Amino acid sequence: MNPVLAAAFVLGLAGSAHCIGMCGPIALAVPSSSPRWGARLLSTLILNSGRLFTYALLGLAFGAFGTGSRLAGLQQGVSIAAGVVLLLSVAVPGVLERWLPHGRVSLVIGRLRSVLGRNLRRTAPEALFLSGVLNGLLPCGLVYAAAIGSTVSGSLLSGVAFMVLFGLGTWPALVAVRMGGGLLGTDFRQFLRRTSPYLVSAVAVLMILRGLELGIPFVSPGEITRPLQATNCH
């Protein structure tokens, strides 16, 4: 697998502790049509599929930006900048949350929260999916970091794959929370919190190395995304 795409899944796993705090309450608030284990699992998968759908759309948008930067010869700088932002998020926890939108955008987000709150009372499959879609649209520093990472994936489809793999990396923890908080013990949650900074830092270093194009196979190949140069005919 492309190491950048593998890093996306690792980033999702690394951010599981963050996801439990941010999305866990929403996952617990979503009702299930039946108290049976199977029905609860099905509603959990539908809910998280909606969130994954939103992430895929974000990957498409940011992948398009990354493709544009590649064609413009800016991919190296974008990759290095993405890595630096991720390292900054580790060195200064909460720094990405400071970029949360304000003004009119914040009003739109407030309305999204209102719609989500009303929709949480419904148990129909389409309502569960919509709740997941809306959940994915809510501001989140970790999602911002993943979206930045998807810009260096190399193409539109790779951008989508990056965000989908990132989302899948968050699934184990969030599914466990919804199926029963006891599935995630205190020791495991502490392990996630301790290891998360190191995993995010590893992803950040990979992005920086990719941008530097040091000629290291797979990790930092040379001229990985150079735009085609026009040739002069004489």
Image: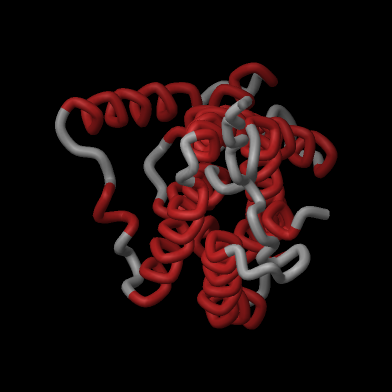
Question: Which residue is painted at 37% across and 69% down in the image?
Answer: 88
Image height of 124 relative to 76, above or below? above
Measured from the top left, where is residue 86 in percent x and y?
A: 45, 64
Residue 86 appears in the picture as rendered: yes
Question: Which residue is painted at 28% across and 24% down in the image?
Answer: 108
Residue 142 appears in the picture as rendered: no
Task: Answer with the quarter of the image where residue 59 lies.
Answer: top right
Measured from the top left, where is residue 84 in percent x and y?
A: 41, 65
The reply, left or right, for residue 221 in relation to residue 122 is right
Q: Which of 121 and 147 is in front in this view?
A: 147
| Quarter of the image that includes the C terminus | top right
Q: Residue furthest front?
A: 234
The reply, left or right, for residue 219 in relation to residue 66 is right
| Quarter of the image that includes the N terminus | bottom right
Question: Which residue is painted at 71% across and 31% down in the image?
Answer: 46
Q: Nearer the viewer, residue 161 or 182?
A: 161
How many labels, in total? Answer: 0
Question: Which residue is painted at 70% across and 27% down in the image?
Answer: 33
Q: Nearer the viewer, residue 13 or 6?
A: 6
Measured from the top left, where is residue 17 in percent x and y?
A: 54, 66
Image height of 184 relative to 67, above or below? below
Measured from the top left, where is residue 130 in percent x and y?
A: 56, 22
The colouring scheme, among rainbow, by chain, secondary structure or one colour, is secondary structure
Q: Residue furthest left?
A: 103
Task: Answer with the quarter of the image where residue 57 lies.
Answer: top right
